[in-house]
């Protein structure tokens, strides 16, 4: 997120600022926010011309309790999370921290509206991470494939082929785990 460099004037922009908007608001200079622009076929034939999306929507700020928490600690942790996610109390927390609401009925603060308005705030129809949690590899396959492309050791076409094979393997795995899905049109 490079907020320290941004606030010190050593970088012209910072990424993921919606998670540090309160800190950025303390800057000694005027700042603004925006989602990434849509990449169109005017710039690359790989584009679908679909609007840029990121999915800064309800559920963006998530809370978890480690599985090792037991007994009274678990009971009180659950009660605390019930309190923190109740819209009656969560709104002031989200407003103060500029977080993304974890439940419906709570609004994201205006300072991060550039990240949550319009198509940018809708969950993407599909993204590279969509099938990784469904596969037995749990994202390791995806990470290894993308590293080759990002490091320049694997071509775009080879990366696409490897991703297609990985996603097909993930879908096949899900079909094995859920045989009734084999009648679905996407499974044929």
Image (cartoon, rainbow, N blue to C red):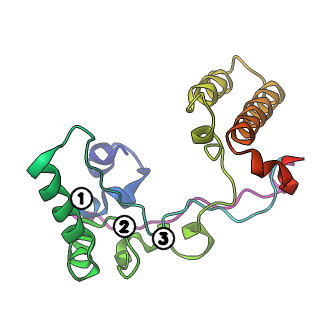
Please tell me whether residue 64 is drawn above or below residue 114 in the rendered image: above
Q: Which mark is residue 102?
A: 2
Q: In the rendered image, which residue does mark 3 sit on? A: 114
Q: In the rendered image, which residue does mark 1 sit on? A: 23
Q: Which segment is the magenta one?
A: 25-45
Circle 2 or circle 3, nearest the eye: 2
Residue 178: name its quadrant.
top right
Give the SS element for disc 3. Answer: helix
Whether label 2 touches label 3, CB < 8 Å: no
Q: Earlier in the sequence, mark 1 or mark 3?
A: 1
The alpha-carbon separation of the residues under discs 1 and 3 comes to 17 Å
Q: Residue at x 59, y 76 (%)?
A: 118
Residue 143 colored in magenta in the image? no
Q: Earlier in the sequence, mark 2 or mark 1?
A: 1
Residue 165 in the figure: left or right of residue 16: right
Please tell me whether residue 70 is drawn above or below residue 23 in the rendered image: above
Residue 31: name its quadrant.
bottom left
């Amino acid at each position: 997120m490079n907020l320290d460099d941004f606030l010190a004037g050593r970088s012209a922009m910072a990424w993921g600022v919606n998670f540090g908007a309160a800190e950025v608001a303390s800057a000694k200079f005027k700042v603004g926010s925006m989602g990434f622009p849509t990449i169109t076929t005017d710039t690359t034939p790989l584009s679908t011309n679909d609007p840029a999306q990121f999915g800064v929507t309800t559920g963006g700020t998530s809370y978890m309790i480690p599985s090792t928490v037991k007994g009274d600690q678990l009971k009180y942790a659950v009660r605390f999370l019930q309190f923190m996610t109740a819209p009656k109390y969560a709104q002031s927390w989200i407003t103060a921290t500029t977080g993304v609401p974890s439940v419906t009925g709570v609004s994201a603060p205006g300072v991060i509206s550039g990240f949550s308005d319009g198509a940018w705030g809708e969950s993407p129809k599909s993204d590279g991470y969509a099938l990784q949690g469904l596969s037995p590899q749990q994202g390791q396959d995806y990470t290894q494939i993308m590293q080759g492309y990002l490091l320049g050791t694997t071509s775009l076409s080879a990366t696409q082929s490897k991703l297609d094979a990985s996603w097909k393997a993930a879908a096949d795995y899900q079909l094995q785990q859920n045989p009734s899905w084999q009648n679905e049109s996407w499974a044929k």
